[in-house]
Amino acid sequence: MASPRSQEVMRTDSEAVAQTTVAQTVEVIRSRWSITPQAGIILGTGLGSLADHIAIAASWSFDELPHFARSTADGHRGRLLGGTLGGVPILAMDGRFHAYEGYSPQQITFPVRVMSALGVQLLIVSNASGGLNPSLNSGDIVLIDDHVNLLGAEFARFARASRTQQADCCELYSAQLLELTERIAASEQIQVRRGTYIAMLGPNYETRAEYRWLRTLGDVVGMSTVPEVLVAKEIGLPVIAFSMVTNVFRPDDIQQNRSEDVIAAASNAEPKLRQLVAHLLIELKSDRDQSSQVSDSAARVASRH
Ligand code: HPA
């Protein structure tokens, strides 16, 4: 086993590499877009249509950005977008990276470090998930308030080599943002509920036995989000994470789960997510006494096609 001293050296080396590579990517983005984004948004499977409602000022295909991986997963377009949503400057990942694509934890979380270096103050994460809690339905939105990390050994090594190991896991998902989002959802008459997200490696969906076991651990299951959330915590970025339930496990009625159905179900539910995200951004930016104006702007964003 490596001594504490050699672990420290390894950590310092990898931090220096990370800082250089982040700076190179930031430079490319800054050469075309000088605005400071307030929030970073990661769009999960089937949720890319939210990107069509961003007033885009600059966009980069992932292959134009140094050190970015490529999107290979179904339903992920593979673009970084700089622009505004609800009038608020944002950076959005239209597609994300997953462990099942063969990417390392460093590659998966690199965009979070870049967004932070560009100035974002908040990370909004979204994903598609399978419902384990029998009271869930396809199309429901779960606000993730905790997780179970079943991503495996490589992720443990990553946590050890970065400061992620030291992330305080008691509050990975900002309690303040959860409460604010619940208030906004109530005012928009959008039903949301809190739940525990379980991250599996994939790429296959779960077996019946796995679903039964996972039900004892949490409410929804997916193949993403946890690495980005851990790095956000490490670097001090507050996180709100939305999980769109695209299929629900019913032990007495097992249905085959297909990725095209998952993508379609997520796209159907996307307008609700868009409305919540837009309203949240505006609320965070505006003074509390401007709340009626906030609702109007959010409704405009939500109804634009
Ligand atoms: N399992 C894992 N990931 C998923 C699922 C699921 O059932 N649905 C959408 N993403």
Image (cartoon, grey):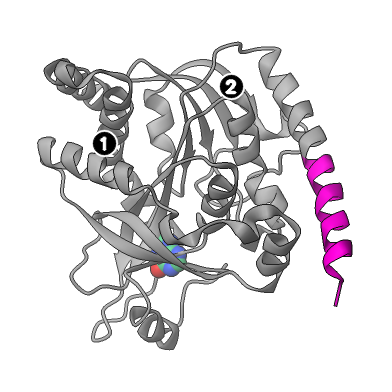
Quadrant where the image shows the N terminus: bottom right
Query: At 27% across and 18% down in the image, what residue appears?
Result: 286
Give the prevailing secondary structure in the magenta stretch: helix
**Does the magenta portion include 103?**
no
Q: CA distance from mark 2 to mark 1?
A: 23 Å
Instruction: Please name which of the two marks, 2 or 1, marks the residue nearer to the observer.
Output: 1
| 2 and 1 marks in contact (CB < 8 Å) | no
Amino acid type, residue under disc 1 in the picture: Leu
Q: Residue at x 64, y 61 (%)?
A: 165
Q: Residue 7: give its label.
A: none
Q: Is residue 177 left or right of residue 105?
A: left
Pointer 2: what residue? 59
Q: Which residues are magenta?
A: 1-18
Question: What residue type is disc 2 on?
Answer: Ser
What residue appears at the point 72 percent right and 57 percent down from the top-left corner? 104
Location of the C terminus by quadrant is: top left
Residue 164: name its quadrant: bottom right
Q: Measured from the top left, where is residue 71 in percent x and y?
A: 63, 45
Q: Which is more toward the observer, 111 or 19?
A: 19
Relative image position of residue 212 (x, y in whole percent): 36, 85
Expressed as whole percent of the image width and height from the top left, the position of residue 213 reads: 40, 85
Q: Label 2 crowding class (10 Å Cα cut-off): few <14, some 14-19, many 20+?
A: some
Tell me if 157 is positioned left or right of 144 in this view. right
**In this rendering, does residue 268 appear at all?**
no
Looking at the rendered structure, the secondary structure element under dot 1 is: helix
When the figure is inspected, residue 90 is found, relative to residue 293, above or below; the finding is below
Q: Quadrant of residue 257?
A: bottom left
Mark 2, secondary structure of its residue: strand
Q: Residue at x 42, y 88 (%)?
A: 209
Please state the quadrant of the image where ligand 1 appears.
Answer: bottom left
Is residue 109 visible to the viewer in this orientation of the structure? Answer: yes
